Amino acid sequence: MTQDFNSRIIAPGGTIGMIGNGQLGRMAALAAAELGYRVHVFGPGHNSPTQQVCAQATVAAYDDHDALRTFAANVDVVTFEFENVPHDSVKLLAGLVPVRPGWQCLHISQNRLREKTFCNDHGIATAPFAAVRSFDDLTNAVARLGRPSVLKTTELGYDGKGQVKITDDTDLASAWTDMNGAEAILEGFVTFEREISVIVARGIDGKTACFCAVENRHANHILDVTIAPAPIRPALRQQAEHIACLLAEKMEFVGLLAVEMFVTRDGAILVNEVAPRPHNSGHWTIDACVTSQFEQFIRAVCGLPLGDPAHHSEAEMKNLLGDDIDAWQAILSDPDAKLHLYGKDEAKPGRKMGHVTWLKTTRPNSAL
Ligand code: AMP
């Protein structure tokens, strides 16, 4: 692959290939359209949130190599709104068209062991961890890391799925059975003061631009509320932002990288996981920043100059899960609220249907 291929700038008017067709792809496609791009989405399932708003769609499985080849021939660059795409598929695309971020970055972020090892190798702290590939590994890891600790599948877990907390009462044999034979990681339990995240963009020229660190509060393992900026000391915020930039540089990342971190009670920052794409904790940027995370994502992936990530308002974002969206009329009546809906047909419990952002963090009359 030539250097030219990787450093190609995709000018407005070009076509961005988007792997994954959920709400992140939808909001990215809307931002791309504002900059004059067409988006061609690739993913399974008809009438997806992304398909509804983009120029072209290929409905196919992520391992359909024929469909991927045809897709690559019809786009100028490929990016992802969903990272759990088979490795072979990403490598296939990378031989045909610029893929941003590159397959190496996806490979790291798809697996919790690789992710944490990469962080530690570059001097970035995480919770202590051990690889668990057998029941014996689990017994040894629990002896080393103690209880409580958290057992997670290394791949394909999200929103707390594929996780078991190991407490004094946990039967290790059944915890191991719950992993269904998948490779796992045991993490020491972090008694955190809060969870934060930082989203950083890195362009093809290596320049980075960082959104301010935000605080994330979860309910039932799913992001509930993001508070921007995070109410933490400026020095801590700067440290978190530095960690995100450092990771993006060390990964030679091109695109948008979200870094989730814990702030411990004694003020240390530990990286929990990274996502190589726009992130739920960056939705507030649509309404409160000079450049949204979605516009920044498109700029980075197309090789354009990055925009200003500064926020002009403080904000609070709340996810609308399942039938939370029934409150849409009340939300629209709140002058501080900005409503975003994802066009999903069925409001299943826990399903992300939309979000609402309040500017200036004033919510006295909010509907929720
Ligand atoms: P994850 O899928 O790794 O993002 O984990 C989901 C949530 O579980 C996190 O947002 C934390 O609230 C909690 N969690 C995950 N790992 C740990 C840990 N090692 N110690 C304490 N809480 C954790």
Image (tube, grey):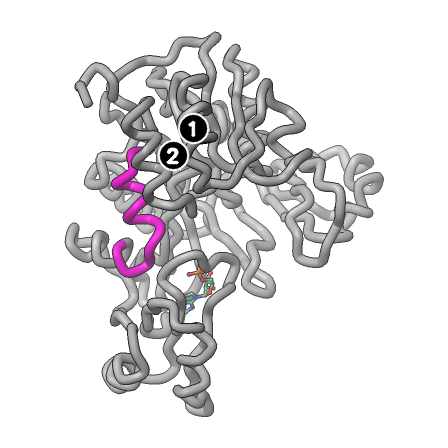
Q: Earlier in the sequence, mark 2 or mark 1?
A: 2
Percent x, y of residue 197: 41, 48
Front-most of residues 153 and 272? 153
Q: Secondary structure at mark 1?
A: helix
Position of the N terminus by quadrant: top left
Question: Is residue 106 located in the magenta-colored stretch of the structure?
Answer: yes
Does mark 1 have its CB less than 8 Å from ligand 1?
Answer: no
Question: Is residue 328 located in the magenta-colored stretch of the structure?
Answer: no
Q: How busy is the neighbourhood of tag 2: few (under 14 within 10 Å), some, or many (20 plus)?
A: many
Percent x, y of residue 133: 29, 73
- Residue 356 is drawn in which quadrant? top right
* Name of the residue lying farthest toward the front: 66
Q: How busy is the neighbourhood of tag 1: few (under 14 within 10 Å), some, or many (20 plus)?
A: many
Give the residue drawn at x 29%, y 41%: 105
Left or right? Give the position of 141 relative to 354.
left
Residue where numbered disc 1 is placed: 297
Which quarter is ligand 1 in? Answer: bottom left
Range shown magenta:
102-114
Q: Secondary structure at mark 2?
A: strand
2 and 1 marks in contact (CB < 8 Å): yes
- Distance Cα–Cα, label 2 vs label 1: 5 Å
Q: Is residue 288 visible?
A: no
Does mark 2 have its CB less than 8 Å from ligand 1?
Answer: no
Percent x, y of residue 212: 41, 39
Name which residue type carries label 2: Leu
Give the prevailing secondary structure in the magenta stretch.
helix
Give the residue drawn at x 81%, y 46%: 327
Residue where numbered disc 2 is placed: 256
Q: Is residue 209 above or below residue 37?
A: below
State the count of labels.
2
